[in-house]
Amino acid sequence: MNKNVFCLILVFASVTAALPVIPLSHALTGQPTVALSPSSYSPTQVNQVFQISITISNVQGLWGWAVDVNYNPQILNLTKVTEGNFLTSQVGTTLFFSFPLAATPGAYDINDASASTNTANGTGTLATLTFQVISRFSQTTIQSNFTLQGVAPTVKNPNGTETKGTIPTITPTSSTAQSTITLQTTLPPVANAGQNQTVRAGTQVVLNGSLSISNGNNPTYTWTFQDVTQQTLTGIIATYTFKNPGIFLVTLTVKDSLGSDTSTVTITVINSTYTQPTITVSGDQAVGEPITFTIDTNTLRDVPVKNYLWSMGNKSPPIKTSNNTETYAYPSAGTYTVNVTISYIDGLNDFATTNVTVGQSSQPISSPTPAASSNPNLNSSNSPTPNSSAGTGVNDASVSLPPTIIGIIVAITIFILVGSVFWLRNQKTYVSNQQSSPVSN
């Protein structure tokens, strides 16, 4: 189960520290059982929908639960998860959520917990899972791993205070439950001879028909091909050593009581002579400098290359490219082993390797030198020459006011000018009033 997700449930347990004391009647007793119900099911066709319930029985003091459900995503699709009524009917509000695990196809995480200190007892349904059959298969299983949790009891200390005890984990009789799903159908078998292979002469080839589907009785698996003479192999998995180069078409025939089907696979056998590809290194082999690694195409097979996977030997992630050249700069000095996996379109891989020793940078790092100024007032020693027009002894080029200061100065200047205009107008009005007023004796 995803332990990080279940920590969310544990957070809710901490809330109980501020809630009323749990009655002693909620103490855990006995061992409950968990199950997937039904434990076996037989759909009859592709696209059929069916449900599997998660059940619990004989539980006391259940506060929360979590489960990881695992299934084959190439066969089944989990379309819906519905909360059961076991907790909600006894504790009221719950925190229920479920989601697929993106990093693990075919894995689903389901969590449920009481939103209070209330717990549930007895037997019931925790959740219902809705599946859909998405491809033909013979048999598969749905598996689940459970975690059950009670509520931490309140402990009275000798001094009269109360603290929370350890959060109890309820241990079921079995922490794992599974349901076996068997597709019951009257359709004939489906043969699958596996993927095409490219091997060198003298290499044993494994022919694998395990992806074939047979729902009838007494299935047989027969492999036939021509290698100088007619060859016949039997069994769902068979082996054969091709001694001569060439292209061989192998046919798998699957028969059972419901019918038969065939599938073919191409085995390409190349000459056993092997020359390992070589890598040339160019560039300044120093820290931070680009180093170019090139695979000599004359040492490659005469087959188109699908991609190159470069491992630079310094724990950095592998680099996949479509060409035979990669440029890389190492951040630290040392000797590194560069490995390259060359994947051809026919399925065969080659490998190339080389060592490179990276030293300290060949260009010593120095402090930045101030740029020469074009200002004629600066002499060759970068010392400022007093500005004769200003007479202040301060070089004009060194004076630079921030925009904010300039804005403040402009605003003050405008304020003074506007104030001066209003003052002059008021003075003029005052003088005029004085001149027009009669003089009293």
Image: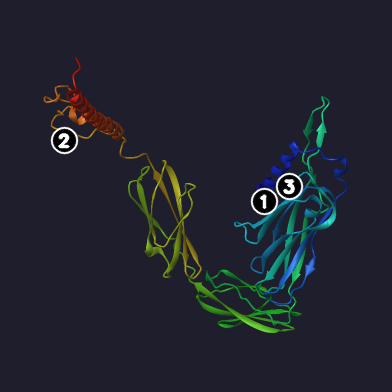
**Residue where numbered disc 1 is placed:** 2
**Residue where numbered disc 2 is placed:** 374
Figure check: 409 above or below 354: above
| Amino acid type at image mark 3 | Ala
- Which of the marked residues, 2 or 1, is nearer the chain's N terminus? 1
- Which of the marked residues, 1 or 3, is nearer the chain's N terminus? 1
Whether the residues at callouts 2 and 1 have beta carbons within 8 Å, the answer is: no
Figure check: 396 above or below 282: above
Q: Position of residue 12 (x, y in %)?
A: 71, 44
| Amino acid type at image mark 1 | Asn
Q: Position of residue 188 (x, y in %)?
A: 69, 82
Instruction: Please tell me whether mark 2 sits on a helix, a strand or a loop.
Output: loop
Label 3 environment density (alpha carbons within 10 Å; few <14, some 14–19, many ≥20): many
Q: Using the rendered image of the protein, determine whether residue 399 is visible from the camera's viewpoint.
A: no
- Which of the marked residues, 2 or 3, is nearer the chain's N terminus? 3
| Amino acid type at image mark 2 | Ser
- CA gap between label 2 and label 1 equals 67 Å
Q: Position of residue 47 (x, y in %)?
A: 67, 74
Q: Position of residue 152 (x, y in %)?
A: 78, 40
**Residue where numbered disc 3 is placed:** 115
User: How many marks are shown on the rendered structure?
Assistant: 3
Instruction: Please tell me whether mark 1 sits on a helix, a strand or a loop.
Output: loop
Q: Left or right: where does residue 276 sit relative to residue 122? A: left
Whether the residues at callouts 2 and 3 have beta carbons within 8 Å, the answer is: no
Question: Relative to the observer, which residue lies in front, 42 or 23?
Answer: 23
